[in-house]
Image (spheres, rainbow, N blue to C red):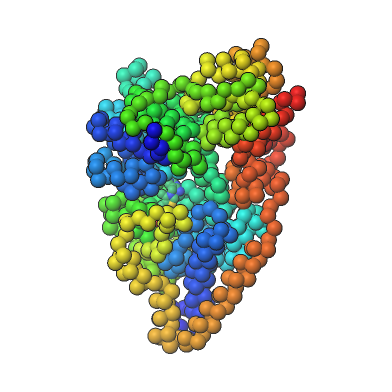
Amino acid sequence: MIENFDKEKCLDIYRLLKMSRRFEQKTLELGGQGEILGSLHVGVGQEAVHVGIALALKKGDIAFRTHRDSGQMVAEGIEPKYLFAELMGKINGYCKGLGGSMHLPGISGVLGVNVPMASGAALAFKIRNEKRVAVGQYGDGASNLGPLHEAMNMAAIWKLPAVFICENNGYAVTTSIKYSSLLKNLSDRGKAWGIPGETVDGMDVMAVYKAASRLIERARSGEGPAILECKTYRFEDHSKSTANLVLSYRSKDEIAEWMEKDPISRWSGRLLNEKICTQDEIDKIDETVEKDIEEAVEFAKNSPLPEPEDAFKYMYATKIEGIPQKGW
Amino acid sequence: MREIRYLKAVSETIEAEMEKDPSIFYMGEDVRYALKGIPRGFIDKFGPERIIDTPISEAGFVGIATGAAVQGMRPIVEFQISMFCFLAYDEIVNQAQKMYYMSGAQMKVPVTYIVPLNFGSIAGQHSDSPHSFMMHGLIKTIMPSNGYDAKGLVLSAIRDDDPVIVFLPAGITGRKGEVPEEQYTIPIGVGEIKREGSDITVVATGRLVPKALEAAENLAKEGISLEVYDPRTLFPFDKPLLKKSVQKTGKAIIMDDSTRTCGFAAEVAAFLSDECFATLKAPVKRITRADVPVPFSLALEKLVVPEGVKELTEAVYDILKK
Ligand SMILES: Cc1ncc(C[n+]2csc(CCOP(=O)(O)OP(=O)(O)O)c2C)c(N)n1
Ligand SMILES: [Mg+2]
């Protein structure tokens, strides 16, 4: 037992961590082979945050995730085959091939909007008297956008059932958060809105889970929103395209130091240390994860492309004759 | 003459002007590392006072640029991705642009916005070409189609006393072309006939200019003669030059990368109907993006964003048959 998790659950947490990582790594690999086009922002290194949040959400809760969080979608139970198909622009994709990696539902390509979106969802829950909670995630870089601050204030004054989770991985592309904020802990910004703010070790899945779950339940009980900052790190470069630029904004030592805190080996290490499971059991999970990922990729590869009319079919929910116009 | 890349032409004109004019500073996200390729090496030369990395706060830093401009600075503001100028639309259109007029000509706002365009499997929120929004906001809008024009126009933009927005077209800023070493300006509002012809006037913008030239080259072999007009400045576009061309050809096709409704092409078509009605021998044709967000799947993207040569060639055949 770790916390309230029995052996089976502990192993499942390991599986989710691994699945998130392998999913993300696979997208990069497929990107390299030209099977996946466009930009990719992988969350390798940040799995403890993604899985921690996924575990803390209850049925009916909703998360608005960042561009780096498709691994969290997997941890939340969205089948990777639909995500792979989306990233390949296929009809069976999660968004019918219309959105791509930066525009999946609950993920915005524009930074800073997740907090307003989550606050809006929370407002709906509150008006309808549903005991649901919305989580709005954002990066350290996105924490400096105006709409985010405006929405946090409104969420605070209206005591909305929302939790704002900052994935502070230290950088926004090349820009260090040490440059773009004078605060040591971004959770201190809670003071500005009169809401609680906490900072946790974002490389420790249990720490994230415990704090997120406590703040989510607090919001559910009507006590209003809070900020949870998870200090974490991305092991890969900002995106598939910046990786080619070989920029020197992070030192090799710094990267190595954070790699030491790898959230997955940390969790498996703990399971082994506390004699919750054996290496064999972990290896078996690795095998099934690999198999699941391969099957999902196969599904995506075998999916057909969208039909031409799909480009225009989904423009308006309420159709009006004559729009959308074509371009030629 | 030496050949350099389009982006290098933009970069060197800014660099030379910054050496001359201490009131210029360059700000944007990740500009110290020149993520978008423009202020490369500037940080070593001009220091962090004039090469200013901003937090991700578009509305905020565009507003700050306006304030600095009113106090006599000449800020250059770079947007990392074209559509994030939407976050600062109020700051650009409702503040920076209106300041001079509303203050009874007291407050000048000499800001230059640099907006790199992009598309190609990056979908919905990363693929728009928002130049028509800016035209509608009455911002001086330029979109150079090659390095030579870019160098001269960007310098005019920096020296202009109003806000000017510069769109750098997708896909062509890596191309090499002849660009003089010395500084020169190309006036804002002056277009250029990029190829003379007699059958149809093709109005093309940005990345679509080379496409129009390619189509014209192909069609010349079939005895069809296209005249290619590059406005270079979209607002205000060069009306006398366009009028002269259409008076000669009597036919026009407009090819532009904004969506169809209220786009640049619609504005040009309205002008032609106002001013060239008597000389037109065929309906004016538009080739634009479709009125939908750009879909992710490449199979669909090509139905929404014109490739250029293909659609233009079809439109030409269609007009000449009539
Ligand atoms: C409003 C806005 N400005 C700029 C960008 C371009 N951009 C995409 S990701 C990114 C960095 C974001 O940093 P952070 O929020 O810390 O998230 P991380 O990438 O580190 O996960 C930037 C600048 C954007 N998507 N939206
Ligand atoms: Mg970050």
Taking the image as drawn, is residue A247 in sight? yes
Q: Nearer the viewer, residue A105 or B288?
A: B288
Write the residue at 52% across / 75% down.
Answer: A15
Is B138 displayed left or right of B263 in the figure? left
Instruction: Please tell me whether residue B78 is drawn above or below residue A99 in the rendered image.
Output: above
Is B258 displayed left or right of B91 in the figure? right
Is A130 displayed left or right of A178 in the figure? right
Write the residue at 29% across / 33% down.
Answer: B16
Q: Nearer the viewer, residue A217 or B159?
A: B159
Q: Nearer the viewer, residue B188 or A169?
A: B188
Q: Nearer the viewer, residue B24 or A283?
A: B24
Q: Quadrant of the C terminus of chain A?
A: top right
Residue that lies at the very extreme toward the right in this rendered image: B322
Q: Position of residue A269 (x, y in %)?
A: 40, 81
Q: Position of residue A36 (x, y in %)?
A: 57, 58
Write the residue at 55% across / 47% down.
Answer: B120
Taking the image as drawn, is residue A162 in sight? no
Q: Quadrant of residue A137?
A: bottom left
Write the residue at 39% across / 33% down.
Answer: B1
Q: Quadrant of the N terminus of chain A?
A: bottom left
Instruction: Please tell me whether residue A213 is drawn above or below residue B14 in the rendered image.
Output: below
Image label count: 0
